[in-house]
């Protein structure tokens, strides 16, 4: 019987309660009969959705007396949810995880796997057993990107063990099979520390995915090009530019890196010195991004001063200062001048007379087109070390840039004033064009003088002109 079938009535006319088919199987982890499943239509393929997958289903929900309380089919729109994340009742998270694409199944869900003692008023009464007919339409894997842009998608093949996952710096042992357009381009086992995968030929997307794995997990990872080999591709592996790829990844084993909170002060200093050395080696090899990661982790072990005293506190401050200065240098190499300036500021806060801090901040200001601020820093370096030729040369460079900057500003202002003057001339010319032509309109003496009729007095005295009313004097006598 499906959820849309009519419920049978007894000979007395009362409604018969729904009874699961003998073919219904208990699919609860504890086999306590809380969720029974009966397949009414077989699905296809062998895969089932895993935790985190976005699943699309049709469903019809009824009470055991046949009362329908909800249906996606009536709404003519599939229902979507994230599997295993608690966004639906427990019975759904358990049941849908057992289904293949296209499968239709009937689930009998006891109240403790549904809405429990309280029910869901006003439709679902307390302690109600529910019947769901569910059809799995499709699903997409779990999106492992921070921005949820679909660039790293995981489909689990084999679940891992326990709850622990690799942290930053954990040493992982993995087996990789990489494919592009169904052709294998690499197959290998590799051991590497999380955060340094690029040094071992591990692309960004695979490394990010492994951080979500549990030990023993095997998953298929679909990577968009920006999380794989990007615009450059990988010619030695026959991967063209901007290619999407697929990996089968198995996390065979891993050892978590020690967290700062788990170490005493001596151990923190040792770890910081170890990371500083790794960062310096990467920097010397021109691997500035990896060096950045090492220096950042180094700072993480010594930025808090709560557990350090005496000589250890002095060493902590020295390492912290080195960390900020080295980060600034890495950012300068990467031409990320804002970040370089900020790291220099932190170094100068620790030591206001740090020549390296002032010098590198001056370089950052030059990169930010702030030559006057840069000059001030280089002059401060010379006060500390008058023989610093690099600082002196940079001051000359700043003077040149300041002069060039002022020249450009002068030219800009000159052009600006010329534009304003030209605009004023154009407005004045336009005003003049709009004024009437008096000579054409009024004649030599004015229209009024030509057209006005003579008075009787003027006719009788043609040789006498009118008095000026304001001066009482004769005019033009």
Image (cartoon, rainbow, N blue to C red):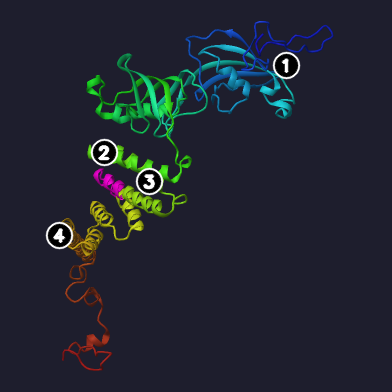
Rate crowding at label 1 as few (under 14), some (14 to 19) or many (20 or more) other CA atoms within 10 Å. some
Residue drawn at x 81%, y 12% as measured from the top left: 14
For the residue pair 419 and 217, the one nearer the viewer reads as: 217
Tell me the element at label 4.
Answer: helix
Tell me the element at label 2.
Answer: helix
* Comes first in the chain, label 4 or label 2: 2
Rate crowding at label 4 as few (under 14), some (14 to 19) or many (20 or more) other CA atoms within 10 Å. few
Tell me the element at label 1.
Answer: loop
For the residue pair 390 and 73, the one nearer the viewer reads as: 390
Instruction: Pick the quarter of the image with the N terminus.
Output: top right
Identify the residue at the far bottom of this view: 472
* Comes first in the chain, label 4 or label 1: 1
Provide residue 181's location: percent of width, then percent of height: 32, 16
Q: Nearest to the eye among marks 3 and 4: give it.
A: 3
Provide residue 299's location: percent of width, then percent of height: 38, 46
Q: In the figure, residue 118 lies in which quadrant?
A: top right
What distance separates the C-alpha of mark 4 from that of mark 1? 88 Å
What distance separates the C-alpha of mark 4 from that of mark 2? 33 Å
* Comes first in the chain, label 1 or label 3: 1
Rate crowding at label 2 as few (under 14), some (14 to 19) or many (20 or more) other CA atoms within 10 Å. some
* Magenta stretch: includes residue 123: no
Magenta span main SS:
helix
Q: Are marks 1 and 3 in contact (CB under 8 Å)?
A: no
According to the picture, the residue beneath numbered tag 2 turns out to be: 281
Q: Nearest to the eye among marks 2 and 1: give it.
A: 2
According to the picture, the residue beneath numbered tag 3 turns out to be: 299
Q: Which mark is residue 64?
A: 1
What distance separates the C-alpha of mark 3 from that of mark 4? 35 Å
């Amino acid at each position: 019987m499906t959820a849309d079938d009519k419920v049978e009535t007894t000979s007395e006319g009362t409604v018969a309660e729904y009874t699961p088919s003998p073919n219904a199987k208990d699919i609860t982890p504890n086999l306590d009969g809380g969720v029974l499943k009966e397949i009414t239509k077989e699905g296809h393929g062998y895969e089932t959705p895993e935790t985190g997958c976005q699943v699309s289903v049709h469903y019809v929900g009824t009470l055991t007396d046949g009362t329908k309380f909800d249906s996606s089919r009536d709404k003519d729109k599939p229902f979507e949810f994230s599997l295993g994340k608690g966004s639906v009742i427990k019975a759904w998270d358990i049941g849908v995880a057992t289904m293949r694409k296209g499968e239709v199944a009937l689930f009998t869900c006891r109240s403790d796997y549904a809405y429990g003692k309280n029910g869901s008023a006003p439709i679902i009464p307390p302690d109600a057993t529910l019947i769901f007919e569910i059809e799995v339409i499709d699903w997409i894997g779990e999106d492992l990107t921070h921005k949820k842009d679909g660039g790293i998608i995981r489909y689990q093949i084999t679940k891992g063990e326990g709850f622990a996952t690799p942290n930053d710096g954990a040493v992982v042992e993995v087996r990789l099979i990489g494919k592009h357009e169904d052709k294998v381009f690499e197959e290998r086992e590799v051991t590497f520390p999380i955060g340094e995968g690029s040094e071992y030929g591990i692309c960004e997307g695979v490394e990010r995915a492994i951080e979500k794995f549990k030990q023993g997990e095997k998953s298929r990872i679909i990577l968009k090009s920006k999380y794989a080999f990007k615009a450059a591709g990988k010619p030695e592996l026959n991967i063209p530019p901007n290619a999407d790829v697929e990996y089968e990844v198995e996390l065979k084993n891993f050892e978590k890196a020690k967290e700062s909170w788990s170490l005493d002060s001596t151990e923190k200093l040792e770890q910081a010195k170890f990371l500083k050395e790794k960062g310096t080696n990467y920097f010397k090899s021109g691997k500035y991004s990896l060096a950045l990661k090492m220096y950042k982790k180094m700072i993480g072990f010594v930025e808090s001063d709560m557990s350090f005293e005496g000589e250890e506190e002095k060493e902590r401050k020295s390492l912290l200062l080195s960390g900020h200065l080295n980060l600034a240098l890495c950012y300068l190499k990467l031409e990320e001048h804002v970040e370089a300036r900020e790291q220099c500021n932190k170094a100068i806060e620790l030591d206001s007379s740090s020549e390296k801090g002032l010098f590198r901040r001056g370089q950052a200001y030059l990169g930010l087109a702030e030559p006057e601020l840069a000059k001030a820093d280089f002059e401060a370096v010379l006060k500390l070390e008058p023989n610093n030729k690099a600082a002196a040369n940079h001051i000359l460079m700043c003077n040149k840039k300041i002069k060039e900057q002022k020249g450009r500003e002068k030219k800009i202002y000159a052009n600006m004033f010329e534009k304003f003057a030209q605009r004023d001339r154009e407005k004045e010319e336009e005003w003049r064009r709009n004024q009437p032509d008096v000579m054409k309109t009024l004649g030599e003496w004015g229209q009024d003088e030509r057209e006005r009729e003579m008075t009787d007095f003027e006719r009788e005295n043609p040789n006498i002109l009118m008095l000026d009313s304001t001066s009482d004097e004769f005019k033009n006598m």
